[in-house]
Image (cartoon, rainbow, N blue to C red):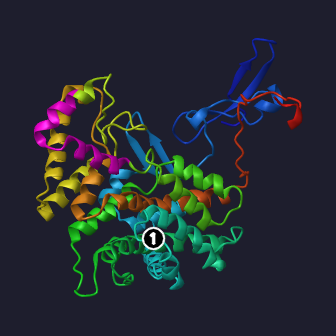
Amino acid sequence: MTGETPQTVTLIDNATGNKVDLPVLSGTIGPKVIDVRKLYGATGYFTYDPGFMATGSCDSAITYIDGDKGELLHRGYAIDDLAEQSDFMEVCYLLLNGDLPNREQKDTFVRNITYHTMVHEQISYFLRGFRRDAHPMAVMTGVVGALSAFYHDSTDIRDPKQRMIASHRLIAKMPTIAAMAYKYSIGQPFVYPRNDLAYAENFLQMLFAVPCEPWKNNPVLSKAMDRILILHADHEQNASTSTVRLAGSSGANPFACIAAGIASLWGPAHGGANEAVLGMLHQIGSRDRIGEYIKRAKDKDDSFRLMGFGHRVYKNYDPRASVMRRTCHEVLGELGVKDELLNLAMDLERIALEDDYFVQRKLYPNVDFYSGIILRAMGFPTAMFTVLFAVARTVGWISQWKEMIEDPDQKIGRPRQLYVGSPRRDYVPLTRRG
């Protein structure tokens, strides 16, 4: 309301009695934040927040998460609505541009992405420089970072047209590069993209087609892949997204920034959760040992934890999990997979959902529990799980990067520190040191 007094928070230095008023900022929804940008100038103090768990690093209009409610919104749209009613190309447009497209806008966007899916032929020779047993994420980090050496016409971050071309190229080429990394690791020839296929279908054919026989699309699997991409498209200011923003704040080109995001995602604490689920299932080993491991998970003195249950952000049900659970059962039903590990996973899910210990603590299966099961059923090796995450998250990264570059208040990232090393000391010549 006009004339309304801005809200402030008063900080009192108990040692001196000095006071400083700090502005309080309000977003559209969510908790208010205390603006501490002038704190050091007014008090000589910095804030201390390892992991930035209570610090807003930017303002953003892209994604909102309410962990207590179990809510995830992209540009105001609930993630489950998008996953059930939309498709990945529409979600990409939404994240990049702020609104859902009309028919003409979507057709144009899909066409632009489709005709950017091929990569420069020289990249295939660059990729062959890696060892065959290289981890696919190592290949992804290197090849995506090298794209700036092939596409000089879209690295001027000050040019809006070049920013958009780079955005389209990254969304389009990431599945192609991921499929090339996979094919290279198993010794099969690279498969070119096809312009007659939708995004998820095209990705699957580049991964699984071989030259000696025609590839047939399975609509259930293509829909599952499309949903996986939607459900992992963006997740606010997580580690990899913050990495992209921090790299981009220096003015680095978008290909380098996305490569930095991939490197951050590679860390097991971030992008390796669904791979950890498969590792846990291997550790349990058989259905008759589920009770033993459920008991261990309840024991606070036991280091064993049920991977894929609960979520660091969501204190309620992961809003992505219900869609992924349904998709998981659709894929398993379609494939009729006879896999003891997948049967074990379904038994573990059922037992945990019926156990009061997990229900009362809201330790429900999350999106990573189901995505790992789906990907194994579809034939992906675990080394490719995080690669698929990177393919999906690219649109989130590039949308966040674009938003940051277009922010007139954007500054190069420069976190401060609490120094705990030696104070200044005099240099002692080598001849005088005992």
Q: Residue tagged by mark 1?
A: 131
Locate residue 93, reporting x and y percent: 47, 66
Query: Residue reaching furthest bottom?
Result: 212
Q: Nearer the viewer, residue 226 or 119?
A: 119
Quarter containing the C terminus: top right
The main secondary structure of the magenta stretch is helix
**What residue type is disc 1 on?**
Arg
Magenta run includes residue 206? no
Secondary structure under badge 1?
A: loop
Horizontally, residue 1 falls left or right of residue 375, namely: right
Tag count in the figure?
1
Q: Quadrant of the N terminus?
A: top right
| Horizontal and vertical percent position of residue 131 | 45, 70
Q: Is residue 125 visible?
A: yes
Query: Which segment is the magenta one?
Result: 273-295
Looking at the image, which residue is at 29% across and 53% down? Answer: 372
Write down the quadrant of residue 208 in the picture.
bottom left
Residue 75 visible in rendering: no
- Is 384 left or right of 328, judged from the image as shown? right
Left or right: residue 7 versus residue 318 is right
| Location of residue 175 in the rendering, given as x and y in whole percent from the top left corner | 42, 71
Viewer-side residue, 125 vs 24? 125
Question: Which quadrant of the structure image shows residue 28?
Answer: top right
User: Residue at horizontal 40%, vertical 67%?
Assistant: 133
Q: Residues within 10 Å of mark 1 (few under 14, many from 20)?
A: few
Position of 358 relative to 194 (above/below): above
